[in-house]
Image (cartoon, grey):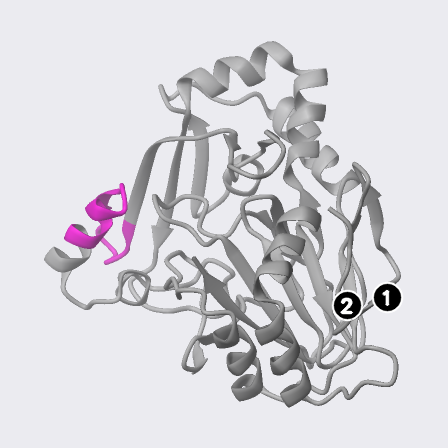
Amino acid sequence: MEFSCKDFKVGKCEGEKLVDGETLPLVLLPPVGGKNDVKSLLEAIDANKEWFEEMIIKNSAVLIRGFDVRDAVEFNDIVEAFGWEDIRYVGPAPRTQIHKRIWTANEGPLSEFIYYHHEMVLMKEFPKKVVLYCEIPSPEGGETPFVPSFRVTERMLDEFPEFVEELEKKGLRYTFTALSNDNKASMRGRGWQDTFGTPDRAEAEKRAKAMGMEMEWLPNGSVRAILCPRYLTRVFEGRKGRRMWFNTMVGMHGKELSSATMADGAEIPAEVVKRCEEIIEEESIEFKWEKGDVLFLDNYATLHGRRPALPPRKVLVATCK
């Protein structure tokens, strides 16, 4: 599909990569001689919704840059302009609602790296798109690196073909602990009441079951969620038959509040996890955030994370079906 749209100019950003013939991310700027106010951006979106969505699928990541997007209210207007249905975040990361569909990204300590993941990959229902907005870029670090997921599968199959196919057949088993109360000093510090949107244990269990989880209450008031079996890879319609590395094996394996094993309980060899971690990092793409940037990620096709940062940093997020 050829790029063609009079309402945007194609730009470049430091860190972009060419992957299987496509530039990631595709950078879209105001047109030559055009205005950079949010009203003009909303008009451009309204006139090109179908084309824009095709670009997200084609390039897996689209970065809108150079428009004067000032705050969460204007970011929400941009998200709502597409008409995409909202999907509520469910998971252990501490987050705060800012305005309507807009939330903070993971509020865990900026000094820590948030590992690569497909958003809500553990759940039965997960976003099709993750949209991020930079209100305050960090003075150092704080990038949101992302990874074309199919490249991880290709390389893991090259190096560990038998293991990948065995794990594909068995599936994965994950556990994570939701704390008794919110703890923003931890990247996985979301309390179970906030995680499941209710202070009632019976209702929390009901909601967890609907999402494909079993729950085990712990003596300290926390709860361990058990998810099994889960996919290793997925193939999604419209994405060239690519086999996405649709799991969080590396991110949850052997951690204090989480685990990842084969679905039958067998351990995943540490050397395989380590090599997968290296491959993911080698395939990563990142750019320096600029104030007003809006990044659209195809959540089916990309993993994303967060580099350690110096404060202040404010990146907001919306998740869409």
Magenta span has 31? Answer: no
**Residue in the image at 22% along x and 44% along y:** 216
Tag 2 near tag 1, CB within 8 Å: yes
Give x and y (percent) for residue 62: 70, 60
Residue 307 in sight here: no
Residue under pointer 2: 28
The local secondary structure at tag 1 comes to strand
User: What is the magenta range?
Assistant: 206-223
Q: Nearer the viewer, residue 29 or 146?
A: 29
Q: Is residue 66 above or below residue 213?
A: below
Inspect the image, locate mark 2, and give the three-letter code of the amino acid beneath it: Leu
Quadrant where the C terminus is found in the figure: bottom left
Report which residue position mark 1 lands on: 11
Q: Residue 18 vs residue 155: left or right?
A: right
81 up-or-down from 303: above or below: below
**Quarter-wise, where is residue 310 in the image?**
bottom right
**Relative image position of residue 283 (x, y in whole percent):** 76, 40
Q: Name the kind of residue labelled 1 in the image.
A: Gly
Tell me where residue 67 sits by quadrant: bottom right
Dot 2 crowding, Cα within 10 Å, few <14, some 14–19, many 20+:
some
As helix, strand or loop, the secondary structure at mark 2 comes to strand
